[in-house]
Amino acid sequence: MRHLQELTLTRSEIYSIGRVAFHWSYLEFAAEHLIWSLLRTKTHVGRAVTEETQLRARLKIIQKLFDAMPQLASISADLPQLIKEIKALEPDRNLIIHGTWKRDNRIGHPAVTALRRSSKSRGHVHGEYFPPERFQKIVDGIIGAGRRLILISGAVDRALASSDDKS
């Protein structure tokens, strides 16, 4: 029983983990939606194309589609920086979602551990603390990136509709 007691997190800490999962799902949807906009396809067709792809693959697809559509260059100007920001959020997201959590009462913050491929040695356990401010910064970054993808998607829809009108 003592072992189970050590794993207990507060409600707000569990809520913070859930917020990361919830908002990351929205970010993934926003990337998916942008692909559908660039392909000018209906949701059910777009979903058939993107449903099995991970976020990193979706970001590559987005970049390649923009590269293939030079008429959208002004819309995609910020895309490399946005992709860089999303990739920077991914390791924390993965650690939060896939790591093993524990309450460290000495520090006053939850700690998460994981066996990471990027660890220095085989079997090395990687651990980090997540105070509320760190959770909030990660969530804010995820929300902001998702919003920016949705804004880009809207701009793509308008630009492509406008080019249809001119044809």
Image: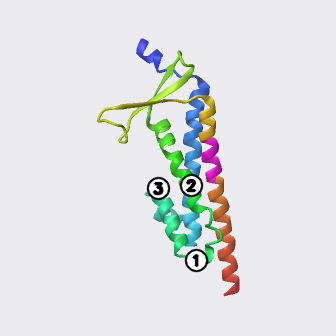
Residue furthest out toward the front: 120
Q: Residues within 10 Å of mark 3 (few under 14, many from 20)?
A: some
Residue interval drawn in magenta: 139-146
Above or below, 136 against 63 in this view is: above
Q: Amino acid at mark 2?
A: Phe
> Where is 42 relative to 101, above or below?
below
Q: Which residue was labeled with disc 2?
A: 29
Question: As drawn, which residue projects farthest toward the bottom?
Answer: 167
Element type where label 3 sits in the image? helix
Q: For mark 1, what is the residue? A: 70
| Position in image of residue 135 (x %, y %) | 59, 35
Number of marks in picture: 3
Q: Is residue 155 above or below residue 101?
A: below
Q: Amino acid at mark 3?
A: Arg
Residue 134, percent from left and from top: 60, 34
Residue occupying the point 51% across, 51% down: 87
Picture quarter with the N terminus = top left
Distance in Å between CA atoms under marks 2 and 1: 24 Å
Going from N to C along the chain, the mark reached first, 3 or 1, is 3
**Residue 82 magenta-drawn?**
no
Whether residue 41 is visible to the viewer of this picture, yes or no, is no
- How many neighbours does mark 2 have within 10 angstroms: few (below 14), some (14-19), or many (20 or more)? some
The CA distance from mark 3 to mark 1 is 22 Å
| Mark 2 vs 3: CB contact within 8 A | no
The residue under label 1 is which amino acid type? Answer: Pro
Quick check: 118 above or below 103? Answer: below
Report which residue position mark 3 lands on. 56
Looking at marks 2 and 3 on the same chain, the residue that comes earlier in the sequence is marked by: 2
Q: How many neighbours does mark 1 have within 10 angstroms: few (below 14), some (14-19), or many (20 or more)?
A: few
